[in-house]
Amino acid sequence: MVDVIASLSALAELPGVPERIAAARDACEQLRWHEALRRRIPEASAESRVRGAQASAALEGATVPLDLVRDVMRGAAQWPLTPDPVELVARGAVTATAESEHVRSLVTRAPLQALARLHVAAAADLLPAEQVGRPRLEGETSAEFRDLGPAPAAGELRERLDLLVAAMTAGAAVPALVVAAVAHAEIATARPFVRANGVVARAVERALLQATGLDPTGVVVSEAGHATQGGPAYLGALAAYGLGTPEGLGLWIGHCADAVVAGAAQGAQICDAVRAGRLT
């Protein structure tokens, strides 16, 4: 049996990784002390989810206006009655990112339940009902992330899910950034669902960053941190993780650390806007 905690702890000590973890932790701590978060955390975290949802959709190739995402998430607008394929993907990203707020108490205690809920949110409009909220079965595959190679078959997938659960429940023995990064990459590379794996992976990362205490206010826009580095860099870092080499694993964790630093900077911009009353 793989000692998951020992393996994750070893990842945290790969060359260059401790410094990147420290930078992410420092960025989150600095954000936590922003004056706007003394009394207005709900406003700031809500706007973080708005921007995170837009960025997550963009990484799926679904570009939608920020104002539309904001209005939909606050109930001031609705998606078209007959949405096009781009809008369907965007709607899933918006719904899953919103749901991340409600599963943060589950991601470290009941990971499979959290995954199921996030997949229902992300894929309800993309898949037949019988394929929503559960892992792929024998004979089912996923065409997503093709650059990462074929998705694992159902037998291997079960083993990968067991390791994913162990990682998500590792607790304080492992740096929070490593837990979130590995969970994100495992979902994206193992592709447990027929569709919406990327959206679920990013929503899980967001929920874990909050649940593990790295970003307790939920204001870091980690999805935007990934998107800011560009889609090719995101896919390249995931591909490096999939190689399983120390260099590849370290590259992915560093990518996630950089995403958190960039996401914290965007969180600070949100806080500035909240304090100034400039959110629209």
Image (cartoon, rainbow, N blue to C red):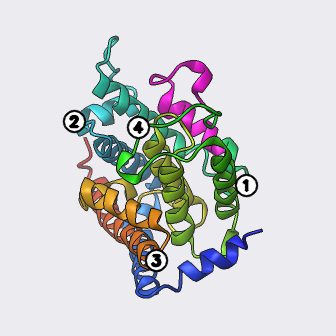
The three-letter code of the residue at mark 1 reads: Arg
Task: Say whether marks 1 and 2 touch (CB < 8 Å).
Answer: no
Residue that carries the numbered disc 2 in the rendered image: 65
Instruction: Please tell me whether mark 4 or mark 3 is closer to you in this view.
Output: 4
Q: Earlier in the sequence, mark 4 or mark 1?
A: 4
Q: Earlier in the sequence, mark 1 or mark 3?
A: 3
Q: Earlier in the sequence, mark 4 or mark 3?
A: 3
Report how far apart the C-alphas of labels 4 and 1 lie in the structure: 23 Å
Q: Nearer the viewer, residue 88 or 276?
A: 88
SS assignment for the magenta stretch, majority = helix
**Residue shown at 54% from the left, 78% from the top:** 11
**Residue shown at 43% from the left, 54% from the top:** 40
Examine the rendered structure and indicate whether residue 11 appears above or below residue 167: below
Residue that carries the numbered disc 4 in the rendered image: 93
The span shown in magenta is: 114-133
Task: Say whether marks 2 and 3 touch (CB < 8 Å).
Answer: no
Secondary structure at badge 2 equals loop
Residue, far top: 81
Instruction: Please tell me whether mark 1 or mark 3 is closer to you in this view.
Output: 1
Q: Which disc, if any, is residue 133?
A: none
Examine the rendered structure and indicate whether residue 135 appears above or below residue 164: above
Secondary structure at badge 1 equals loop
Residue that carries the numbered disc 3 in the rendered image: 25
The three-letter code of the residue at mark 4 reads: Ala
